Amino acid sequence: MGTVLVTGANKGIGFASAKLFLNNGYNVILAGRSEERLIAAKEKLNNAVEYVVWDVSDIHQAPIALAQAHKFYGNIDTIVNNAGIVSDEDITGSDFLDKTEEAWDKTMNTNLKGLFFAIQAEAKYMIQHNISGHIVNVCSEVSYRVAYNAYRASKWGALGLTKGLGRRLARDHIILNGVAPGETATEIFRVEEGLPVKINSPRGERAMPSEIAEAIFFLANSKNIIGEVLISDGGRSLH
Ligand SMILES: NC(=O)c1ccc[n+]([C@@H]2O[C@H](COP(=O)([O-])OP(=O)(O)OC[C@H]3O[C@@H](n4cnc5c(N)ncnc54)[C@H](OP(=O)(O)O)[C@@H]3O)[C@@H](O)[C@H]2O)c1
């Protein structure tokens, strides 16, 4: 198989994806903003992976992290842009009139600006090394819903970039797609990861991170699907 780098890989959907790629024979590189948390994640994977420190909200780290990551196994042909945050004010559902610039900037710098420049650095890296690669962006089911806060606006952006850059990068032999998870049992909700929670959807419960990883893995091996954002939400967006 190939070599995959996953951003935001120390827990949640990113960790589950790293594990799935590892179990399928890939060389795996975890990327994240805390070395301590990356080391803990690496240990949970029996130290069978490598890691690089990469805070995606600092766009200057992207090319440096990719160059460091390249040293482990050579060409990285698959990259999962998974790192993302939701601010406290968006999680609690505070009203639009109370939203703050601080939360907007933090969210956008990670989820949208960070994503845009991560993809730019990844594309330059793949072109420089003559890699026909795959990139998968973790968007959201809310990418398809009305946006009234920074998180939702950032995920609309992620959807748009996946489609627009999916088209742009195909000519450089880079296949870019996205996954749109619905509610998934991770700490992004400020609860314990993996906790089964009933929700109002046809399936009736939150997805497990490993189930979202399956969609990411599928798209990381597609040849003819380009610029697609695949919904995995237990049917919640069906009206
Ligand atoms: N869970 C859901 O219901 C759901 C639904 C739709 C979309 N998503 C998306 O799925 C992705 C993964 O989230 P999750 O649900 O797995 O949540 P999670 O368990 O909170 O994981 C988020 C990951 O992103 C990392 N991260 C945050 N900011 C970062 C930064 N600036 N640089 C590098 N890494 C950073 C976190 O690292 P730290 O541990 O250092 O904070 C963590 O590893 C996100 O893009 C999220 O928006 C989740």
Image (cartoon, helix red, strand yellow):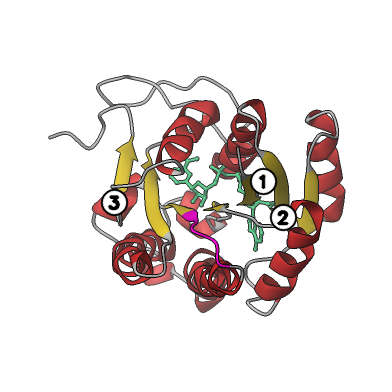
Q: Residue at x 39, y 62 (%)?
A: 158
Q: Residue at x 12, y 35 (%)?
A: 239
- Give the mark nearest the N terminus, 1 or 2: 1
Q: Give, as a three-letter code, the residue at label 3.
A: Glu
Determine if the C-beta at disc 1 is less than 8 A from ligand 1: yes
**Any mark on residue 9, and which?**
1
Residue range highlighted in magenta: 130-134
- Identify the element where label 1 is drawn: loop
Mark 2 crowdedness (10 Å alpha carbons): few <14, some 14-19, many ≥20: many
Q: Is residue 6 magenta?
A: no
Q: Is residue 78 above or below residue 97?
A: above
- Which residue position is annotated with label 2? 32
Q: Give, as a three-letter code, the residue at label 1.
A: Ala
**For the residues carrying marks 1 and 3, which lies nearer the camera in this image?**
3
Q: Give, as a three-letter code, the residue at label 2.
A: Gly
Determine if the C-beta at disc 2 is less than 8 A from ligand 1: yes
Question: Toward the viewer: 158 or 70?
Answer: 70
Q: Disc 2 versus disc 3: distance between alpha carbons? A: 25 Å
Rendered location of residue 224, percent (x, y): 28, 47
